[in-house]
Image (cartoon, rainbow, N blue to C red):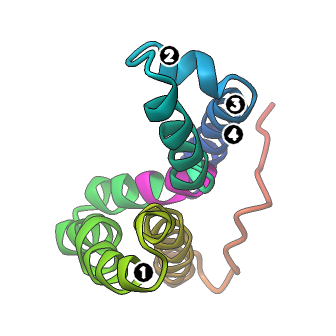
Amino acid sequence: MEEAYKIATWTGVVIFSIALFLVEVFPGTIVGLFNKNPDIMAISIHGMRIYLMAMPAIALGMAGSNYFLAIGEGKAAMFLSLLRQVILLIPLIMIFSKAYGLTGIWLAQPICDIIAAIVTVVMVGKNLNKYNGGSQFSLFKIRVYE
């Protein structure tokens, strides 16, 4: 199960990193698919770059939530899902919007993504350590079977 989690996590990180690269390199093309108004495009490009800057961190949350679902820990999976989109995001939007306006609203999402990713890795790591017979979990060690 540990190896499956690591492979899923790193695959997601790579895919989301590629998506982030495309957002950074071709923002006008992406936004232009939905709107051609120059004023709206300028605001959208700025917002999209901020809002999506932590895309690779989303992979950790997704893989962790799916890990807990796979082992029958639905409460942990639900907590991780709610952590990112409700528990953290709503209060941060309210706080950051007062402090930074529209930019603060966009900043709330990547901050939530990073915090949720850290919490997810800690929770998965503790769970895996419990079942690994004392072996420490590391997201960076992947066994390759021949």
For mark 4, give the secondary structure: helix
What is the three-letter code of the residue carrying label 4?
Answer: Ser
Inter-mark Cα distance, 2 to 4: 21 Å
Q: How many marks?
A: 4
Type of secondary structure dominating the magenta stretch: helix
Q: Is residue 88 left or right of residue 138?
A: left
Q: Which residue is mark 2?
A: 32
Marks 2/3: CA–CA distance: 19 Å
Q: Are marks 4 and 1 in contact (CB under 8 Å)?
A: no
Residue numbers of the magenta segment: 56-62
Question: Badge 4 is on which residue?
Answer: 17
Viewer-nearest of labels 4 and 1?
Answer: 1
Q: Is residue 1 visible?
A: no
Label drawn at residue 96? 1
Q: Look at the numbered disc 3 and give the secondary structure of its residue.
A: helix
Q: Residue at x 51, y 49 (%)?
A: 47
Q: Nearer the viewer, residue 43 or 11?
A: 43
Q: Residue at x 33, y 75 (%)?
A: 93
State whether residue 30 appears in this view. yes
> Residue 2: image x %, image y %?
57, 58
Q: Looking at the image, which is closer to me, 84 or 130?
A: 84
Callouts 4 and 3 close, C-beta under 8 Å: yes
Look at the numbered disc 2 and give the secondary structure of its residue.
Answer: helix
85 left or right of 47?
left
Q: Earlier in the sequence, mark 2 or mark 3?
A: 3
**How far apart, in angstroms, are the residues tagged by discs 4 and 3?**
4 Å
Q: Is residue 77 left or right of residue 130?
A: left
Q: Secondary structure at mark 1?
A: helix
Across and down, in percent, residue 80 comes to: 32, 70
Residue that label 3 marks: 18
